[in-house]
Image (cartoon, rainbow, N blue to C red):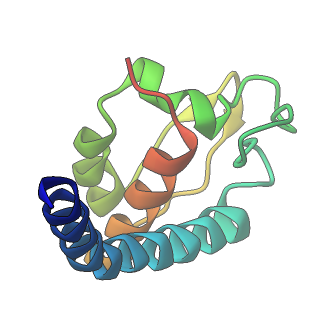
Amino acid sequence: MIALRFFAIGLAGLALATPAMAQSSASAKRGEAIVKANCAECHAVTRTGESPNAKAPPFRTLGQRYKLDDLQEALAEGIVVGHGGADMPHFVFEPTEIDDIIAYLKQINRQR
């Protein structure tokens, strides 16, 4: 009987978590589309592969260099960086796009 109660509690918790997980997954999918459209010319934007520009870090490693949530401000103000002489286009993203990009980065990164 006790095991059945724990099972029911677990199912209830899963039911509550599922909408948030689905929303997070949808956000990450939108973020993936944004970075593929804007960043893949230079950066590896998936979990595998090399960056087309060897000096542009793969997005899956950004969590090793930065706290990903800290990138929100840079994405809002516009990232202006070069990759060894190659100018990076100036990007400014909307708040919802930033949330989506961060969700995607968290999905493909392994933060320490």
Q: Position of residue 7 (x, y in %)?
A: 25, 62
Q: Quadrant of residue 44?
A: top right
In-front residue for pair 75/96: 96
Q: Quadrant of the N terminus?
A: bottom left
Q: Quadrant of the C terminus?
A: top left
Q: Is residue 63 visible?
A: yes
| Residue 46, placed above or below residue 20 | above
| Left or right position of 30 against 43 | left
Residue depicted at 50% across the width and 49% down the height: 107
In-front residue for pair 15/43: 15
| Left or right position of 98 against 53 | left
- Residue at the front extreme? 1
Residue depicted at 68% across the width and 33% down the height: 58
| Left or right position of 94 against 100 | left
| Residue 20, placed above or below residue 98 | below
| Left or right position of 68 against 51 | left
Residue depicted at 66% across the width and 65% down the height: 38
In-front residue for pair 70/76: 70
Q: Position of residue 77 (x, y in %)?
A: 27, 58
Q: Is residue 93 visible?
A: no
Q: Quadrant of residue 57?
A: top right
Q: Position of residue 12 (x, y in %)?
A: 19, 75
Residue depicted at 61% across the width and 66% down the height: 32
In-front residue for pair 86/98: 98
| Residue 45, placed above or below residue 55 | below
| Image label count | 0
